[in-house]
Image (tube, helix red, strand yellow):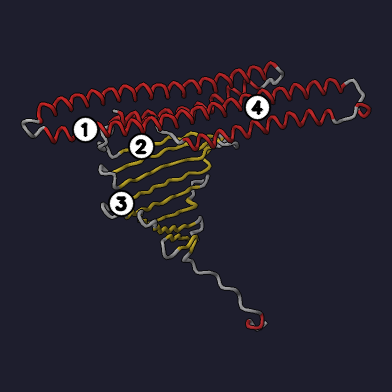
Amino acid sequence: MVAFLFKESTAKTTKLEVAAKDWADAANKLSEAAQTIRTMVKAIPYEAWTMDDRPLYESAVEDFGQQLDALAQYIDAVQISIMVVAYALFTYSIFAFGMAVYLDALAICVGAAAAASVTVVGAPASATVIAECQALASTGLTITAVATGVLAAVATGVAMVMGGGALLTANSQQDNGATGAFDAFKKAVVTGGAAAGANLLQGAANSGLNFLNRSGVKMFPLAEVDFDADRDIENTWNVGGGVKLTTPEGQGEAEAGYHAKIKDGHVQGQELEAKGKWTHPGSDVGIGGGGKLEWDENENLKNKSVNVGVEHGPSGSKVEYEANWDENNKYSDKYNVNTPIFNRTDGSFEKKQEDPPPPWDQGL
């Protein structure tokens, strides 16, 4: 059960840190923009613009600057909130490491007690030791559950701050004359709701799989699912999903996924991808491969690719090859080799087009 709680609390803190930096950069640029437009207006000499509309223009610019400042403050709050979650996850990871060491020590103790129980003299004491270790492990489970709950509460609180802050900022902007601010907020909620819904559905499905596999033994080949619903700046949605399968021993894994790009209700492109990897037991040699198919907006197959690779962990050796065919079935390839004795990046088996002969060899 502790392993299940640990699995539920995993996240990529480095990506959170990168996202926080991007939000911070956006806040700084908005603040700089607000200061720039104020400076530009003040730079106009009064004798060059003495008409009555100047105070009105300065007032409008100041209002716009205040709106930018308010938006920058909200974005800065988002950046801080993301870092709070990142630090909470980092703290939890330290706790999880300590708890894992603690439980490993209890497991060793139980193993030693079980070994001693085969003797007549050691059996009574072994039973007492095993019972005490089980009680201590139960305490560890309780502590882990509380720590996981605290982490979830932090994440929930941060989400409330971000959502509530967006609402308050939109209302403030609306009151300051930005008539479309609240409509933009509602549109953002709808857009973000689609992505959030996909992530929640993905999280619920993966939680169920983690619970079924909480003993550490893979009870089902389905290890993970992925759902996507994201919109880019050009109002193009990227929707789709994928699955990850693993063997019971963990030696092999396979992934497959499908995504479509949709804009204004029309499919702009599709892609289907599959890949797998298998590690030979006891040899540390891994073999992998996969392929991808891509279609254009007219459902014409435009790109096809396959790839294979072999790697050896202890030596750091890795060999990869990829072949591609475009919409005209024109072939291209590349390979990478990384070994202790030979290295090459972006090599190719394609026959290079020879340079044309000089004019005197062409009879010109």
Of pointers 1 and 4, the one earlier in the residue sequence: 4
**Quadrant including the C terminus:** bottom right
Residues at marks 3 and 4, CA–CA distance in whole angstroms: 50 Å
Identified at 77% across, 30% down, the residue is: 37
Residues at marks 1 and 4, CA–CA distance in whole angstroms: 56 Å
Q: Helix, strand or loop at disc 1?
A: helix
User: Of the numbered discs in the image, which one, if any, rests on residue 72?
Assistant: 4
Q: How crowded is mark 1: few (under 14 residues within 10 Å), some or many (20 or more)?
A: some
Residues at marks 3 and 2, CA–CA distance in whole angstroms: 19 Å
Residues at marks 3 and 1, CA–CA distance in whole angstroms: 33 Å
Q: In which quarter of the image is residue 35?
A: top right
| Of labels 1 and 2, the one closer to you | 1
Instruction: Give, as a three-letter code, the residue at label 4.
Output: Ala
User: Of the numbered discs in the image, which one, if any, rests on residue 279?
Assistant: 3
| Of labels 3 and 1, the one closer to you | 1
| Of labels 2 and 4, the one closer to you | 4
Of pointers 3 and 2, the one earlier in the residue sequence: 2
Of pointers 1 and 2, the one earlier in the residue sequence: 1
Instruction: Give, as a three-letter code, the residue at label 2.
Output: Glu
Q: Residues within 10 Å of mark 2 (few under 14, many from 20)?
A: some
| Of labels 3 and 2, the one closer to you | 3
> Which residue occupies the foreground of this view, 78 or 308?
78
| Residue 31 placement (x, y as % from top left) | 69, 29
Instruction: Give, as a three-letter code, the residue at label 3.
Output: Thr
Residue 273, placed above or below residue 77: below
Q: Which residue lies furthest to the front in this view?
A: 121
Residue 331 in sight here: no
Residue 1 in sight here: yes
User: Of the numbered discs in the image, which one, if any, rests on residue 109?
Assistant: 1
Identified at 62% across, 21% down, the residue is: 183
The residue tagged 2 is 224
